[in-house]
Structure formats: C-alpha cells, structure tokens
Amino acid sequence: MEYKTDALVLRSADYRENDRIVTLLTAERGKVSAAMKGVKKAGAKLNFASQPFCFAEYVIAEKGGRNTVTGASLHDGFFALREDIAALYGAACVTQACDLLLYEGMTGGDLLVSAVRALGRLSAGEGTGAVVAFLSEALSIAGYPVGADVCPVCGKLPAGRMRFDMERGIFTCNDHSDGVPASESTYRSVRAALLGEEGTEEGNIRAIRLLGAYFALKTDSEPKALGEYLRLLAPMH
Ligand SMILES: [Zn+2]
C-alpha cells in the first residue's frame, strides 16, 4: 500500500552504505519511521528529503510492516537554520520535543503545524520567542497546558516574586502555592507567547528553562536538546 502525507523529518540516521532511516512526524499517522534507499549516492534525487528539518509531502510505501519513502515534494527545507547556530539548536529542541511527545498511534496534525511554524520563525531569526511559543503549544497539544493568567487562589495577576505550580502548569503569587520559584520576567514571556506577543530575551531564556523542566516532569523524558540550547544561549548559568 502506498500513501501520501505531509511530514517533517525529526531524525535521520545513516543505514547501510547508501541508505538512511528517517523518523517522520506525519499529519495523519503521527510518528513514522521509513527507509530511504540510495539517498547517500551522489546526485540522489531524494537526498533533500532525508535531511533533518525537511518539511515535504512524502510518498510512503508500506509492505509487511516496513515503510519506504518512494517520493517527496518539498514544502520547506528551512535552509536558513544552517547559517545560525542558535536557530539550529532551537530547531533541534523543536524536533526532539515532537519526538518525545509522540507515542505510537498518536496522530500528529496539530503538532506538525506548530513545529513547522516554529521552524519558520527560527529560520526568520525570531529565536527564543519561537521556542517558548512552540513549547507552550506542544505541551498543550500533549495534554499538559501551561497557563500564565491570574493566580487561581486570589484572582489577581501575579507580580514580583511568584511560583510556578508544576502539578497544574500555572503561575501563582509567591504565597499562594508551593510551586517552584519563578520570576516575573519568566511569567511575562510565557504570557506573551500564549498571547502571540514577544517576551524579552532574558525572560524567554528563563521561560525555556522552566518549560523544559515542566516538560521533563510531565513526559518523564529528558529533552537534552533544550539543555544544549540553554547552554549556548546562557553559558554562565
Ligand atoms: Zn494569588
């Protein structure tokens, strides 16, 4: 059986002399692994579609439980990522988060849209704000929404020192929960991302650190790319 699907390459691994195995985030079937034969040969027509971050319409042949990519037509290769190390590390956070969030059988349409948007923003030089927005969206899609609105205890907008409740994924005033300490700039950056606005660079970096910890806790996984991205952005911490 052969089918067409929009998909993003989350991972690509060399296999045999001339082949690669790609891990795709597909719109209809979630995460799909597929072989790409001969793509390492000089002049291979489908080489582009075996590269990380490639977003294309893939033709996938399924036989005996094995998938093989037989065709692809490019939507966007996000080539600008290769020219900006921070953007490239940010993009790796996006694809790794998708990889960790998707379990077998989960469809990936919303996550694909969100990831493609984030890679587009990173390619356009938007940086940390794009990663904060993506993490907030991805966590919400996975069933762990993040809130940065009024404190649920007193109904006021938290200010100054505050806390982030890791159970509920929301910010509260400093004395209104026993969550982890969080700064106002972190809160403002998460709030800005949820409202489609831009936070400050410092707040965004803090927000990525906080959302990364929340992600790790909720998904019981280790998003290593986030740690590497943070070390690149803020080596002093
Ligand atoms: Zn409160």
Image (cartoon, rainbow, N blue to C red):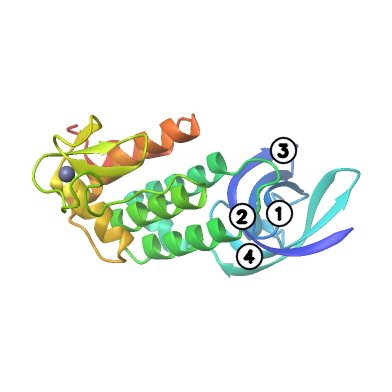
Which is more toward the observer, 221 or 148? 148
**First in sequence: mark 4 or mark 1?**
1
Task: Label 2: state its secondary structure.
Answer: loop
On screen, residue 1 versus residue 225, left or right, reads right
State the mark number for residue 15.
3
Please give the residue where the numbered disc 1 appears in the rendered image: 29
- Kind of residue at badge 3: Tyr
Residue contact between numbered discs 2 and 1, judged by CB atoms under 8 Å: yes
> At numbered mark 3, what does the secondary structure look like: helix, strand or loop?
strand
Q: Amino acid at mark 1?
A: Arg
Q: Are there few (<14), some (14-19), or many (20+) residues within 10 Å of tag 4?
A: many
Between discs 2 and 4, the one toward the N terminus: 4
Instruction: Say which of marks 2 and 4 sits in front.
Output: 2
- Distance (Cα) linking label 4 and label 1: 15 Å
Q: Residue at x 67, y 47 (%)?
A: 22
- The reply to whether callout 4 and callout 3 are in contact (CB within 8 Å) is no
Closer to viewer: mark 4 or mark 3: 4
Sooner in the amino-acid sequence: mark 1 or mark 3: 3
| Res. 151 visible in picture | yes
Callout 2: CB less than 8 Å from ligand 1? no
Give the image quadrant in which the ligand numbered 1 is located: top left
Q: Secondary structure at mark 1?
A: loop
As measured in the structure, the alpha-carbon distance from the residue carrying label 4 to the one carrying label 3 is: 21 Å
Q: Which residue is mark 2?
A: 108
Q: Kindly indicate whether the residue at mark 1 contacts the one at mark 4 (C-beta within 8 angstroms).
A: no
The nearer-to-camera label among 4 and 1 is: 1
Using the image as rendered, state which of residue 148 and residue 124 is in the foreground. Answer: 148
Q: CA–CA distance between discs 3 and 2? A: 26 Å
User: Which residue is the site of mark 4?
Assistant: 56
